[in-house]
Amino acid sequence: MKFIFRIIPLLLLSVNVSAQSLDGSTEIFANNEPIANSEISIIPEPVSLIKQAGHFVLPNNITIQVSKLPELKQTVAFLKERLSIPTGYYVSSVNPPSANATIKLIINDSEDATLGSEGYHLTVGLKQVIIRANKPAGLFYGVQTLIQLLPKEIESKEVVKNIRWTAPCVEVKDFPRLGWRGLMFDVARHFFTKQEVKQYIDAMVRYKYNILHLHLADDEGWRIEIKGLPKLTEVGAWNVKRVGTFGDFIPPKPEEPRNYGGFYTQEDIKELVAYAKDRFVDIMPEIDVPGHSLAAIASYPELSCTPEAVNYKVRSGEKIMDWSRGAPPLGLIDNTLCPANEKVYVFLDTVFTQIAKLFPFQYIHVGGDEVARNFWEKNDQIKDLMKREGLKTIPDVQAYFEKRVEQIIVAKGKKFMAWDEVLEGGVSQSAAVMSWRDMKYGKEAALAGHEVVMTPTQYAYIDYMQADAITEPKVYASLRLSKSYEFDPIPQGVNPALIKGGQANLWTEQVYNIRQAEYMTWPRGFAIAESVWSPKEKKNWTNFFARTEQHFKRLDIAETKYAPSVYDPIFTVKRSADRNLSINLSTEVEGLDIYYSFDNSFPDRFYPKYTTPLVPPIDAKVLKVITYRGKDPVGRMMNMPIEELEKRAGKR
């Protein structure tokens, strides 16, 4: 139990604490841990927040004072839209200083060194809101915080009547822990339209993300126009539509139409880059090579070492890898570019020349992961390459390829980034590493002097199931919200300057549409956002989830889909001494009651409440469970087959 001390606000004017109360008093908590309530629930948690007495009330004629900096144009447009649509109020902007302006956006004349380029200072007073920052990005993030201080109805896409638009008076000083705060969106496995990518950007900036990593090419599709290589989009962008469990699909028949997919023209890409830049987001492109390249090979078979490639088609989700021996996988077909073929490097030079011109961001991601090398091992071209270049092992062959690709990237004035497998054969010191398999690979990379972005599967793979497999689209593993919240991108024992930041990755094998993309991203995207923005010492699960619940209400009004999986019970099953099943039920969050039935009916709070491990009746076929908070159901009705529990418990 934390002790709460209440003291009068005047004694705290110079104290840097998080304090959030509704009565105007300030609250200090043990270990400086903040408390969330329905009025102040900011994600990610600010560096410092001091609650003052009183409330600011939005007038029905809102004036925004802003300097003439062109970089502020979109921030003002964003704020105007967010305020005017739900309130119905008139919102205007003025350039010269105005003492009576409702909201002032001010670039500091002399920089506040603690704020950096993305920090801000927000003052919500009784009569006026002032946001100060060193750079335009800071003002944009200050605006995001201001929006979160207003009632949840501010998220509405239509006018909301009979509501008082107020914000609590606060002083906020805030700046990010890390510069790289990313989300990876896989648009290769399933194509997402330009408008849907914009929708994803709009959602991520509310939580102060600043990098959108676009996975643009894979076995299932090539998604970007490359002039001079028309087959990449004529052939490589299209496959046969399949719905179900990805990876287990029936191989397409020759007569089935290949009309499922799509691509972005170069004009589309320019539009997306500009749209993101207006919201202080950089887009990093990824072209995944030498593995994951079936779409490119189906378009241009001469890029393969394998003669059979002339018969290859863009993958539609059928099995093409054998993972039975673990990583690296065995390729059932050869989905790799040929490191021994000079045509490959000419091809990649063409691709990356155009990619570099389209994307201003300094990094280009080139993949390098999950390369099935078994076709290389038997190939005469590869053997000749190894002999000619003095390469001892197959990993050395990939290292040769990566170094050639890095030379191409650097020649375009860009920096090379790849997944952590590229460390196996060695890469140049200047190569940046994105660590996905485990935190340890990122740590090893940093200790070797590489720049690192942390995105480990155990915390940041938001394509993983969020609750029990009986309710979620089946993927390789599970990742619950509470586990994501444990993410700390800076491991002990490394130079923090080499950890550029962290990101969450949304692979889309099992994500067929933008609504499911939202469902998989939120609320785990909240957890990663807080892990890369907020001070480490501010992180507190109980507080975070209290704020998350308030943001669920905001997402409801915004009509953004999210996963309620955190409310679902967790099943743990074992065999008791008498070899019967023993079923333990628990919850990820505190304060929930679990009700259950074995008789095929749907339990509510008048059914038996779970208190001790359950033993199913001898003929029971299904255990149905639901969670409540008090009198209100919060979890989904879950139907757990007893047969499934028997499998999980193992043999008798």
Image (cartoon, rainbow, N blue to C red):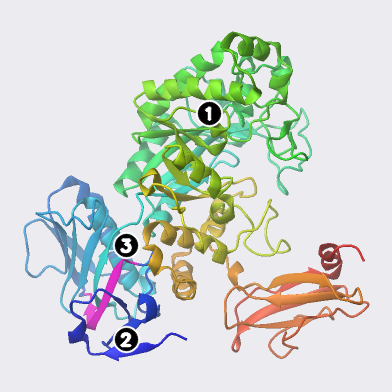
Label 1 Cα neighbours within 10 Å, binned few <14 / some 14-19 / many ≥20? some
Task: Of the two numbered discs 2 and 1 on the same chain, state the one appearing first in sequence.
Answer: 2
Question: Is residue 127 toward the left or the right of residue 406 in the image?
Answer: left
Residue at 42 percent of width and 37 percent of height:
449
Q: Mark 1 points at which residue?
A: 426
Q: In which quarter of the image is residue 300?
A: top right
Disc number lying in front (2 or 3):
2
Q: Mark 3 points at which residue?
A: 144
Give the residue type at disc 2.
Leu
Question: Callout 3: helix, strand or loop?
Answer: helix
What range is drawn magenta here?
46-58
Per the image, the residue denoted by label 2 is 22
Q: In this view, does 153 lie above or below 106?
A: below
Which one is earlier in the sequence, the residue at label 1 or at label 3? 3
Name the kind of residue labelled 1 in the image: Gly
Main SS of the magenta part reads strand
CA–CA distance in space, label 2 to label 3: 21 Å
Who is closer to the viewer here, 623 or 165? Answer: 623
Q: Nearer the viewer, residue 258 or 130?
A: 130
Kindly report the distance in space between the C-alpha atoms of the residues bearing marks 1 and 3: 42 Å
Picture coordinates of residue 52 (x, y %)? 23, 81
Give the residue drawn at x 32%, y 73%.
Answer: 150
Q: Can residue 198 be seen in this view?
A: yes
Tell me if mark 2 has few (under 14), some (14-19) or many (20+) residues whose alpha carbon lies within 10 angstroms of its own: some
SS at mark 1 in the image: loop
Q: Is residue 487 magenta?
A: no
